[in-house]
Image (tube, grey):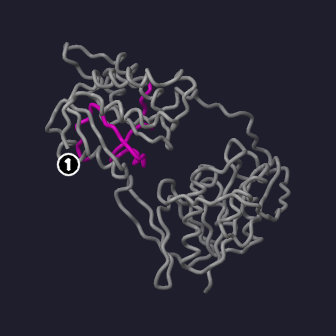
Amino acid sequence: MTESILFLAHVDESGTALPKIAFEALGAALELAQRLGSPLDIGLIGEDIQFAPDLLATAGARRILGVTGADFAKPRFASDAAATEAVCRATTPSLILAPGTSRFLRALPSLAQRLHGQVDTHITSVEAGEGAISATRWFYRQRLEGVIQRDARPWILLVDSGCHEPWHGAPGRGKWEEVVVTLPPEAKRTMVVEIRAPRADAQTIRPDAELLFVAGAGWTKKQSDGKVHPEQAETLILDFLRASGASLGGSKSLVDQSGESQAVLGFMTHMNQVGQTGATPRHPKGLSTCCHGEEPHVVGWRFINERRAINLDPNCGWARGKADVLYVADAFQVMARVNALLGTRTADPEQIEPVASNKNLATEALESEKVKQVG
């Protein structure tokens, strides 16, 4: 049976670009199409998608279809499900690949039901060989890998971010076909009134950041003077996050302290937790501070390419082969010096965008410190 492949994407919240993860999912779809020798179609959704066909013109798609209009500007289950169904009816694909955005994670399981197909989410790779197509994904906080094969068609696969090289191509002049979708009144009952987001300096979870900064429970323990300094710890960490554009993580012992009547960091929540029972991020670089680096925490760092840590104990878990570099030093002193160095080279923190030109300054600042390195 010849497989036909459809790649689905939507315009991002700005309305002027495609999400970064969309290019990663497109790279996976193109690779699969090449291996199978199958045609690839592209379906786009948004209020105005005129820019997108030109952006994807050199991807080699057989057809580019789009559903446009004000009804499809914002994420909404009913309109997204109707739009994706219309594109699928127009292309009759057997395999559908899409980025695993929150918008599609809500709508595409319903699409599978409407098309009498199957859907799998959080896919990390798609392989074709020996007459069968298989998809892989992680289970149990990404400690177990599962391989999935299905005979049912269409088969919808939602691809996770950070799992495939994004497609890069020169823009051109793309031709596309409009798929007209008229929504009934009941599909418009949900309306997006406004989007409330924290200020840039208050947002601590940044999936696209170059650096992951993880704080351990040591930040809230007694220091050399016999006292705890949570206020100073908060200032040091937040100043670093603003200046570097890093994403914030926390160890389980730190995020659990809020329920143990201990000193806590006010901005740290369970959403920041990294480790066996937390998140498994995929940042290029990671810096752990005041954390011992034992296995339940380190398992969350498995996809970090370059790992560094700051700890006063030269025999901690990080020193036993779990970090590329261990700085044996007081994290309070090191981060105060790092912030001072960053402050001499950055602009007003309110104007700094995450993953900006400051993304390598943190590493440079650490290298300038006169601390003992192990590893």
Q: Position of residue 166 (x, y in %)?
A: 54, 58
> Between 321 and 70, which is closer to the camera in this rendering?
321
In the rendered structure, the answer to whether residue 97 lies left or right of residue 16 reads left
In the rendered structure, the answer to whether residue 249 lies left or right of residue 87 reads left
Q: Is residue 269 above or below residue 229?
A: below
In the rendered structure, the answer to whether residue 261 lies left or right of residue 150 reads left
Amino acid carrying label 1: it is Gly
Q: Is residue 21 above or below residue 375?
A: below
- Where does the magenta region start and end? 267-295
Q: Position of residue 295 (x, y in %)?
A: 24, 47
Q: Position of residue 144 (x, y in %)?
A: 35, 61
Disc 1 is placed on an element classified as: loop
Disc 1: CA contacts within 10 A as few (<14), some (14-19) or many (>=20):
few
> Between 241 and 199, which is closer to the camera in this rendering?
241
Residue at image location 33% in from the left, 28% down from the top: 257
Residue sitting at the far left = 315
> Between 117 and 327, which is closer to the camera in this rendering?
327
Residue 181 counted in the magenta span: no
Residue at image location 55% in from the left, 32% down from the top: 353
Quadrant housing residue 367: top left
Prevailing secondary structure of the magenta residues: loop
Q: How many marks?
A: 1
Residue at image location 50% in from the left, 69% down from the top: 126
Q: What residue sits right under mark 1 in the picture?
A: 321
Q: Quadrant of the N terminus?
A: bottom right
Q: Is residue 244 above or below residue 98?
A: above
Q: Quadrant of the C terminus?
A: top left
Q: Position of residue 324 (x, y in %)?
A: 26, 45
Residue 269 counted in the magenta span: yes
